[in-house]
Structure formats: C-alpha cells, structure tokens
Amino acid sequence: MALAERMEETLSTNSSSVSMRDLVKTYLSAAGEENYAVKHFSLDIQPGKLVTLLGPSGCGKTTTLRMLAGFDIPTSGQIRFGQSDVTFTPPNKRDIGMVFQSYALFPHLTIYENVAYGLQIKKVPKEELKTRVNRVLALMHLEEFKDRLPSQLSGGQQQRVALARAVVTEPKVLLFDEPLSNLDAKLREYMRDELRKLQQRLGITSLYVTHDQAEAMAISDQVVIMTKGVIQQVGSPHEIYTKPVNHFVADFMGKANFLTGKIEGREKDAWIVSLENNRILVKVDRNIPVQVADAVDCVVRPEFFTLDEEGEFTARLTRATYLGTYVEYEAVLGNQDVTFVDYAHHQHGWREAGTDVKLRLNQEAVRIIPARS
Amino acid sequence: MQRGNTGIAFQHQLKTQRTRLKMLSKEPWLLGIIILLFISLFLFSVYPILQVLKLTVYDETGFQFDKVAEVLNAHFFQILWNSLQLGILSAVFGTAIGFVFAFAVTRTQMRGKKFFHLIAMLPIISPPFVMALSMILLFGRNGMISSGLLGIEDSDIYGLTSLVVIQTLGFFPMAYLNLRGVLESIDGALEDASLSLGASRWEVFRTVTFPLALPAIFSSLLLVFIKSIEDFGNPMVIAGDYSTLAVQAYLEITGMYDLKAGAFMAVAILFPSLLAYMIQKYWLSKKSFVTVTGKPSQASKGIGDKRIVWPLFAFCSLLTGSVLLFYGTVAWGAFVKVWGVNYTLTLDHFKYIFTLGLDSVKNSLIMATASTPITALLGMLIAYLIIRKNFVGKKLMEFSTILTFAVPGTVVGIGYVLAFNEKPLLLTGTAAILIIAFTFRNMTVGIEAGSNSLRQVDASIEEASTSLGANSLTTFWRVSLPLMKSAMFSGLVYSFVRSMTSISAVIFLVSVNWNLMTVSILSQVESSRLGVAAAYCLILIFIILIVIGFLELIVNRLGSSKRGAH
Ligand SMILES: Nc1ncnc2c1ncn2[C@@H]1O[C@H](COP(=O)(O)OP(=O)(O)O)[C@@H](O)[C@H]1O
Ligand SMILES: [Mg+2]
C-alpha cells in the first residue's frame, strides 16, 4: 500500500515542536499521601519527530500523554507547543490528533461521519469537508466502508479509521496511546510500519506510548525509557540499546547479562576493568558516574559472546535451548550466571549441557554501569 | 490517616479543586450551566424541604417549642403508628408476592411469562387509586361482589385491611421488577452445581438462590415501605377512620388551615422514608452487586419440575387474575349507568367528561408534555456531568437530585406552597409550579438510567470528540446523548407516567385554572360519581399507553435511521 506517498499530496502539515518542562503529576492515595504518577519529567520533541514513551505498565506513560492532550492537568510544570504555553489550555483548543488504544470510534456514526466529525466541529465549508474526508478515506482504503458503522468493521479497519479521523484535521501534534495493542501480531507489525511511513511523510510531531520495546525500536526517532514516573534515558533506539545508562534500561531494552567486575585503572579514554580473571577495556562515558576501584556491572548482551577455541573466558554450560535461528545457552562463568546465543550453530553444531566451552567477548560493545548498591 | 498526611491531603485537594475551577472557567457555557443547575436544584429541591423543616419548630416569634409539644400528642402518635403499620404490612406482603412472582417468571419454565409480566406492569403505569376505586366498586356498599353476589348489606370496606390488600396488589410489581434483575443474573450454573452435588431443589433454594437474593429482598421491602407510607391516593379514598400521615397532613392544611400540624405530619413521613431510601441506595445496592457476576446463563433452562411449576402457575394466575379483575371492574364501571343499581351500558360518563371535565385532561397532558422532555434531557445532562466531569460540589449536586425523589410527595407539595407563595418567587397558582415540581421530582430516574448507561461507554469516545475540537456541551449533544438513547427513553416514559399519575405533591399545587386529572378523579370519587371517576381512569391509562407506544416509536426511529443508510 503506497498509502504514505499519496497522503503527502493530500494533507499539509502544521506541526510544531513540543516542550515539556519539569512536569509533575501526583494523585492522592487512599492513605492520604501524594503518589507520583509522573515525576519531574522534561522532554523536547523537535517538529516532525516521533518520540516513544516506553516503560512497564503503570510507569506513567498514559498520564504523560494525557497531560500533553490536556485531559489531565499537571500538578506543576509547563507544556509548550511551539512558542505557546498550553499547560492550561483545554484539550479541544490544543489542535491535537489522538489515536486511542480502544480506537474510541463513535459507535453511532458511520465511518464517513466519524472522519468528518473533526472538520464539522472546525466548521470547514461543506464542499471542502467532503473532498478532504473522501481523500483521506481513499488513502486509507476505507471508501467502500464509508456508510458502515464501526461495529461492522474488523480491528485493523477500525484502526485505520481511527488514524484517518486523527489526521484529517491536520493537527499540530499527534498522540498515540498503545494504538496497536489490540491487533494480532502480524497486523501489528504491518500497521506499525505503515504508521511510521505515514508519520514521516506527513511530518507530524508525534508522541507514541507503548510497552513493547520492539515496536518502540521500529518506529521511533527517539525513545524515552521511564519507570515509576521518572525518565531513565532518552536517545535513539540504537543509543539506548548500545549505551544503556543503568540496569533498568539495559534490562528493559533487550536482554542483558550483568557481570560484576572492578575498575583497576584508566588508560587514556578507557577504563581497565577486571572481569573473571581477564582485563577488558571499556570506553569512558561521562554519563556513567564511576571511578577507579569502583565495583561495576558490565552490561553484556547475549550476542556479545561467541564460541571460540581461542576465547579468553571459560564457562560451563548448564542448559542449551535450540530455537531454530539460534541456540540459547545458559552457563556459569566463574561463579556468575550468563546467557549467550550462538547463531553459527549450523557450522559447529551445538554443545551439550555440562561441557566446558571457551568464549570470546566482543569487548568494544561492553558497557559498564555502577554496581547495584 | 495520620496527622501529617491530613495536611498534605488537604493541600492536594485544595490545589486539585483550584485547577478544576480554572479549567472550568475556560468553558464558560459549561460553567454557566453548572451554576444554573446548582441554583435551581437548591431552589426547587432543597429549599422547599428546608421550609417545611423550619416551619415545624419556628415561626415569626422565633423558636416555638410549646407548639411542638401541642402537636406531638397521642393523636399524632396514633397516626404515625397507623402509617408505619400499614407500611410494614404492605412491604412484607408486597415483597413476598413480588418475590414468588419474580422467581416463577425468571427461574422456571412456566408458561405465559410474557403475559404475567405485562399484567404486572398495569399498576405501575396507572394512577395509584384505581385499585381503591375498584375496591369500592367490588366490595363496597353497592359492591358487585359484596351486595350483588353475596347479598351483604352495609358492607364496610373502609380501613386497614382494604388498604393492605390494595397496596399489596398495587406495589408488588415494584418488588417484582426490583427482584427480577437479581434473580435473572444469578448464574444457573451455581444452582446446577448444587443440584449435582445431591442437594434437593428446596435446599438449593434455601442455600443458594435465597441468600443471593437477600439484599434485593431487603431493598424491595424498603421500597414498598416507602411507597406505602407516602401513598396519598389510596388512603384518601378508602382508609375511612384509619388516618395516615399523608392524608392527615393534607386535611390539616386544606381543612383546618393548620400549616404547622401539616408540616409535622409531613416530616413524620420524611424521616422514615428518607432513612429507608438511604439504606436502600447506599448500603444495599452495593451488596447486591456481588450477585451480579455475569450474564444470564444460557445453560440452565430453569426449573421444569411440574410439582413446582404448577403451583407457581396457579399463584401467578390468581394474582394477575385479581389485577385484571380490579382493572376490568373500573373499565366496566366507566360504561354502566349506576353501579350496583343499574348496569345498563352507557357513554354518559364520557360525555360528562368531554363536556364538563375536559380541562383537567388537557391540563394534565400539557403539564406532562411540557415537563417530560425537559426532565429527560436535564436527567441525561446531569448524568453526564456527574459521571464525566469534575467540579466542586459534585457530590452535593448528586445528593440534591436524589432529594426530591426520595422525599415524599406530601412534603414536596407543602414545601412548594411554603417556598413559592411570596414575591419574588410567587409561583403558586401557576402552571409553572406544576411543571417545575414534575421536573425536579421525576429527574432522578433519568439520572440513574443515564449514569448507568454512561458508565458502560468507554470514556475515551468522548475524549476523542474533545481532542477533535468539540467542547463539553457539543460532545454531550453529539456523542454522549445518542449513546444514552435507551436511558433517555426510560427517562421519558417514567417522567411522563409519573407526571400523569402522581397526586400526593400536586394536590397542594393545583389551582382553579390549573387543575389536574388525578385531582379531578379524586374529587369525583369524593362526590360519589364513581362512574365518572372510572371513565377518567380509563382515559388516563389509555393516554399513557398511547404515549409510551409513541415514544418507543420515536426513539427506535432515531436509532435505526443510521443503520438503514448503508
Ligand atoms: N486517576 C488516577 N487516580 C489515581 N492514580 C492514578 C490515576 N491515573 C493514574 N494513576 C496512577 O499513576 C500511575 C501511572 O499510571 P499510567 O500513566 O496509567 O501508567 P501507564 O500508562 O504507564 O501504564 C499508576 O500507578 C496509576 O495507578
Ligand atoms: Mg497506559
């Protein structure tokens, strides 16, 4: 579907930058205490970019999104669209488009009326309204359904209606709250690619909420990892995967081994870290507050190890799981548990649990983070 | 809660409320409507009741406690006891019968369920004293059964027994409707499970069905009790020397011009019924949720055992037979010359109404038609505000909407007379006071139905409308209201029926220019023109049936036009 390409001609963009400054949202608990749903949250979104909030359920993603939409008002802090302060602007005056997890289509209106709704509210002249709605419906391949009610459409079709309804008004900011979580896996991947293409072509500033890290990696310019209402790290998907700043981020974004080591010294711009009778060099990162003699955790992704007779580490396998594309091994290295994967098992077969193996570590990829206290 | 936390909590609340107010001020129309609602709710729900309460202890010279002692004499307590006794008896009989009826209709494979259900609706949609009128026609001095069939002369049916019979027949449908939902929702699988464990039918009933229905049984008892003690029409017609509060209050005020004594009687109904209502609403309704665990189960077809079904069938037949007998008698009474003396068929009574008594029919129709859409729409709007909006004093709004519903009509009537008989709020004697009384008294059912249906609507549907640029009122009008269609329908029907049939409040508010049908019927009964009264009743029921059918048609039309389009 060359949906995105044609969309470009149809809709002009009026998107703006978004800036959130020190947002706090508290709720009163039953015990009369203030609970932080979102805590000192600051984030800038450049015009036309898609930023994803990623974190476990209950970490404050929806609350943040709803503050941006205007459905929740922050306890303190400021929100700006472009130059204008919208912190206390009602949602209907913010010029946003929103795609809901449940789609939230108007059940009593036809597909055409659903999409036309926003333009009617904005008092767009009849003729123009008709053309705009019809064009968007055509783009989304929804023409044939336009006289149906939402309940007569499949999940994927409803999702497209929700999207059409949100973009037809050419909003400044587009908001998504787990929009794909009600679709099955295949459709989800398809829709997420379409959605990304559409967003890039339209250039609408977007905030996207999900708890699915693969989805976040696939569609985002930037990912914001949060937990318990606090931002842990902001960066491109690549940065976050390769340079996690703490245990939470490393663990949430992909799989990670945390191997305990110790900083022995420094050599130019690298730390010398002792790790299970070996010395490895790890690039200094200003964001990681460590110094010589500190105990640290080395973040080692499962794919950083390779089976190699000349490898510097010796480990005893405790379990091998054949997964087709790769074999996943669990092993003991010194006295630490590690998990690693072998993609080359077609060449050298796979090893039994109980045997000793030699492993080589891709040292350049290893990051260190302060050990858990 | 700890001391330290109270401060934090208070500050948090303060800040939250301030933010809400700030956001509300950005929707001036919404804010205006909320303020207007608060003012009118205070004026027409709370203030009149305060007036009644005030009158009981206070007059121009200040607090008056000696007068209080004077009113609270043995006579007063006798009347109070009469009302309570009547309430308790009717509640027990009405609920018991309602329960058996509901059980038969919901949990068995009995035949004729639809028919039984329909007949049980008759008392709900007709004026309260049809039963009383019929009682006189059947068992009175010239009664068809008492003197006609049995040859009893001087049959005296005025008193407690007749009242209990009439109220039981008139109010058991309320208990039935209240219990029906719960009995329906009890999962048949639960009963089947007990049966398969070797329990007998009786044991299953005793240990599963009955305990699950218990909260609803209590709430039915309370509802019928309230209905009974605030009933004005039936006791007025048939109580004889058995004085009850609602009737006595009316007589004190209109007969002896003793407002204070009347207010006392009214307050004496107010407290027990308000208490019963609060228990019912806030305590029992929570308990009964426990039983509503799922959809009615399809697995269980209900009891088919003939030894259970046949007695229940006989019971239901007898009951609906009695209801039909009572209504049939009134219908017949409308068409015969002189009941008990000359049973020749005639249209005289209708001619009488169409020549001399059409005004009150017209007035009733005008008042009900004027207040019904306002009531239903206001009900939906308030439901929307209460469920979807946050504003200071929301709980207060909720409470005051319940107030006029839970407060007995007699109290409302007296309260309105007290509150609105002076400038600048001089409303007594106008049509407005009747319309306002109807609106504020009948709103609650619409609000409840609207709230329930809104709770089932995903709030993000309305948020979607808002995010697309619609303000709250537009969202209400274009999204929420269409989704509350069926609640709107119940609101319309209920408010129309109540406007047409109620009497206890309006009897204080009608005037020479604005008389109502129910009041006309009562005065016809009092002047022994039973045929005319019966004809009025028949016309009233006829109008209600037509209007319900009409409303159903409109609401269905509104809903289906969309579906027809594709
Ligand atoms: N209206 C509310 N009242 C009280 N607590 C709330 C409310 N909304 C959210 N919370 C709390 O705020 C936290 C964050 O919720 P949310 O933003 O919905 O998380 P997420 O979308 O990341 O799953 C949760 O602990 C939740 O319980
Ligand atoms: Mg969420």
Image (tube, rainbow, N blue to C red):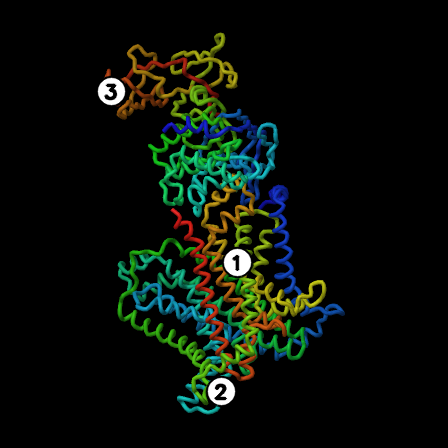
Q: Have a look at marks 2 and 1 and say if they share a chain.
A: yes
Which amino acid is tagged 2? Asp
Badge 2: residue crowd in 10 Å (few <14, some 14–19, many ≥20): some
Q: Residue sitting at 59 percent across and 30 percent down?
A: A80
Which amino acid is tagged 1? Ala
Front in this rendered view, residue B498 or A292: B498
Instruction: State the count of labels.
Output: 3
Q: Have a look at marks 3 and 1 and say if they share a chain.
A: no
Q: Chain of mark 1?
A: B
Is B244 drawn above or below residue B434 in the view shown? below
- Percent across and percent down for residue A371 are 46, 22
**Dot 1 corresponds to which residue?**
B376
Quadrant of the rendered image containing residue B20: top right
Mark 2 vs mark 1, CA separation in Å: 44 Å
Is B263 drawn above or below residue A230 in the view shown? below
SS of the residue under disc 2: loop
